[in-house]
Image: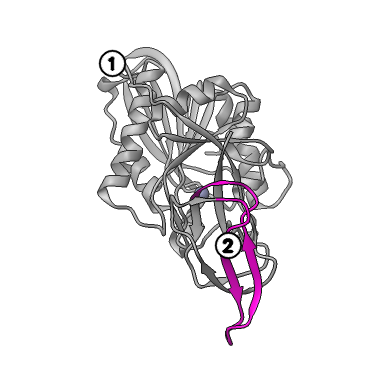
């Protein structure tokens, strides 16, 4: 099966299985169709295979009962299955590329490009709204935030319903929710928990957020409380050299322009690079591993938009 099963059959059901976007990929899915017609919400996780909190949250969402909802819920809980089982960070092991930089993908490209293309052509167009769940990878600490495509008010409204106060307005392209937004499907990318941890509080934060979005779009009864968002943009300094990373700031710390954010040193203690703050704001996430490689992100600074 290279496509998801038909969505609107008119019969309430929970359907589970695996779909083959390419010859070498097999990914799990769940489709929950309610008794009444309504919107279609797509929820994905595991674009980054070791962001376990978001994966466990979507595994739980697959247990949603057809009688609970109006419309259809599509859940793809682990897009990057190989990275999940091999506990790889950032990339798809098949081609070494970050799936969340590959959108809209290529039909004849490498594995991650083909998977992105399949999502953009086969899956995103079926949805009325899209949530791509993420979190801090095995090597990243993170304070929760929701990314939405800059300038898209409908996506921003989904972020306000999801309920995380900090919202990052993201420009650029290549990432899942931008590709979806460009097809006219409002989309958000919530990030919760870090270092691959999947504690009860953060998993529940993710599932509760998805349920509030389901209320917001009319799939679940009740009105979602709307969170007043602190909208920021994100500045991400990267490592200019490989070495040992010594951050100077904690998650949530306020930082001013010119402040020392951290240093990269040799194993003998010689300083190779000092990273100074270029945009005032606060720390949204940071690399927590002692090792750092050239070109890797060191931290994210949220700057009031
Ligand atoms: Zn991620």
User: In what element is the residue under mark 2?
Assistant: strand
**Does any portion of residue 4 appear in the rendered image?**
no
Residue 274 placement (x, y as % from top left):
64, 68
Residue 64 placement (x, y as % from top left):
29, 31
Look at the image and say whether residue 197 sits in the magenta stretch. Answer: no
**Residue 252 disc label:** none
Residue 55 placement (x, y as % from top left):
39, 47
Which residue position is annotated with label 1? 221
Q: Earlier in the sequence, mark 1 or mark 2?
A: 1
Q: Quadrant of the C terminus?
A: top right
Compare residues 159 and 66 and report the one nearer the observer.
159
Give the crowd class for mark 1: few <14, some 14-19, many >=20 residues within 10 Å: some
213 horizontally vs 60: left or right: right
Q: Is residue 121 above or below residue 205?
A: above
Residue 209 placement (x, y as % from top left):
36, 32
Q: Is residue 239 above or below residue 180?
A: below
- Which residue is at 69% across, 41% downward? 105
For label 2, being within 8 Å of ligand 1 is answered no
Which residue position is annotated with label 2? 260
Compare residues 262 and 164 and report the one nearer the observer.
262
Give the crowd class for mark 2: few <14, some 14-19, many >=20 residues within 10 Å: some
Compare residues 292 and 213 and report the one nearer the observer.
292
188 horizontally vs 95: left or right: left
User: In what element is the residue under mark 1?
Assistant: loop
* Magenta highlight range: 256-283
Look at the image and say whether residue 271 sits in the magenta stretch. Answer: yes
């Amino acid at each position: 099966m290279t496509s998801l099963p038909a969505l609107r059959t008119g019969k309430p059901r929970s359907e589970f299985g695996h779909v083959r976007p390419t010859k070498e990929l097999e990914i799990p899915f769940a489709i929950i169709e309610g008794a009444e017609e309504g919107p279609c919400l797509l929820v994905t996780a595991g674009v980054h295979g070791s962001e376990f909190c978001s994966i466990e949250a979507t595994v739980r969402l697959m247990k949603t009962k057809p009688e609970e909802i109006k419309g259809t819920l599509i859940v793809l809980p682990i897009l990057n299955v190989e990275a999940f089982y091999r506990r790889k960070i950032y990339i798809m092991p098949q081609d070494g590329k970050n799936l969340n930089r590959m959108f809209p993908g290529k039909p004849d490209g490498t594995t991650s490009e083909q998977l992105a293309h399949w999502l953009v052509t086969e899956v995103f167009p079926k949805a009325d709204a899209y949530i791509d769940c993420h979190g801090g990878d095995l090597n990243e600490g993170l304070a929760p935030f929701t990314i939405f495509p800059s300038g898209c008010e409908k996506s921003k409204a989904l972020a306000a319903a999801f309920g995380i106060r900090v919202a990052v307005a993201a420009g650029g392209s290549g990432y899942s929710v931008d590709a979806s937004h460009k097809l006219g499907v409002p989309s958000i990318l919530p990030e919760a928990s870090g270092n691959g941890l999947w504690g009860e509080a953060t998993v529940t934060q993710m599932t509760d957020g998805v349920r509030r979005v389901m209320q917001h779009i009319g799939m679940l009864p009740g009105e979602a409380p709307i969170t007043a968002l602190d909208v920021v943009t994100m500045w991400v300094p990267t490592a200019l050299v490989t070495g040992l990373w010594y951050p100077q700031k904690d998650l949530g710390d306020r930082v001013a322009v010119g402040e020392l954010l951290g240093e990269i040193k040799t194993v003998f203690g010689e300083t190779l690079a000092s990273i100074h703050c270029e945009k005032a704001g606060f720390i949204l996430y940071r690399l927590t591993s002692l090792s750092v490689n050239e070109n890797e992100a060191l931290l994210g600074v949220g700057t009031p938009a």
